[in-house]
Image: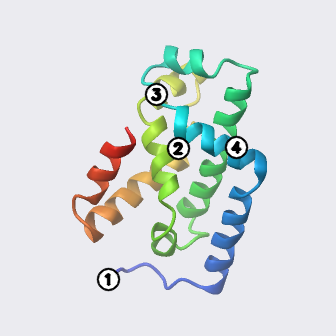
Amino acid sequence: MKTTAPKATFDDVDLILRLYEMRREPRLREARMWFASSFKPRTLDEFRTLCPAGSDTNASYRMVTTYWEMVASFLTSGVLNPDLFYQSGRELLFTWQRVRPILPALRESYRHSLELKNLEDAALAYIDWWNHAAPGAYEAFAERVR
């Protein structure tokens, strides 16, 4: 795919590898496994039932979403080359797909309009990239993870 984005650098590769290593940390790995298998709320009430304040599930939710919010901030601020990241960072989209239904209600509840904003912006840019690279692939992916 032809792009106008700057060419990826060694620093981009190094950062992606460091982020991958962080994902291998045992507690984050456990949280990610829980998130992938169990985090499917469609409403704020379902979220509050699944992840009550102070619970292990709430800690897992926060661990996964803040990790991907951090990664997304690297993309949205221009620190990390998006074209390189998009080729292997699909878990960011998986996380976005799972939180997307409840995010407006979370933002309202927290009175924080920027809650997971980097994740949203990075995911939307990623979706646009994917739709240009492989039309229809994102929709098929989104359907699988819903």
* Label annotation for residue 117: 2
How many other residues sit within 10 Å of disc 2, few (<14), some (14-19) or many (≥20)? Answer: some
Residue at mark 2 to residue at mark 1: CA–CA distance: 27 Å
CB within 8 Å, label 2 to label 3: no
Q: Secondary structure at mark 2?
A: helix
Residue at mark 4 to residue at mark 2: CA–CA distance: 24 Å
Could you tell me which quadrant the C terminus lies in?
top left
The correct choice, above or below, for 5 with respect to 91 in the image is below
Type of amino acid at the residue the image marks with label 1: Lys
Residue at mark 2 to residue at mark 3: CA–CA distance: 13 Å
- Which of pointers 3 and 4 indicates the residue nearer the eye? 4
Could you tell me which quadrant the N terminus lies in?
bottom left
How many other residues sit within 10 Å of disc 3, few (<14), some (14-19) or many (≥20)? Answer: some
Type of amino acid at the residue the image marks with label 2: Lys
The reply, left or right, for residue 90 in relation to residue 25 is left
* Label annotation for residue 109: none
Comes first in the chain, label 3 or label 4: 4
Q: Residue at x 46, y 67 (%)?
A: 86
Label 1: which residue?
2
Label 3: which residue?
102
CB within 8 Å, label 2 to label 1: no
Quarter location, residue 56:
top right
Type of amino acid at the residue the image marks with label 3: Ile
In the rendered image, residue 71, in percent from the top left (x then y), is placed at 61, 57
Quarter location, residue 22:
bottom right
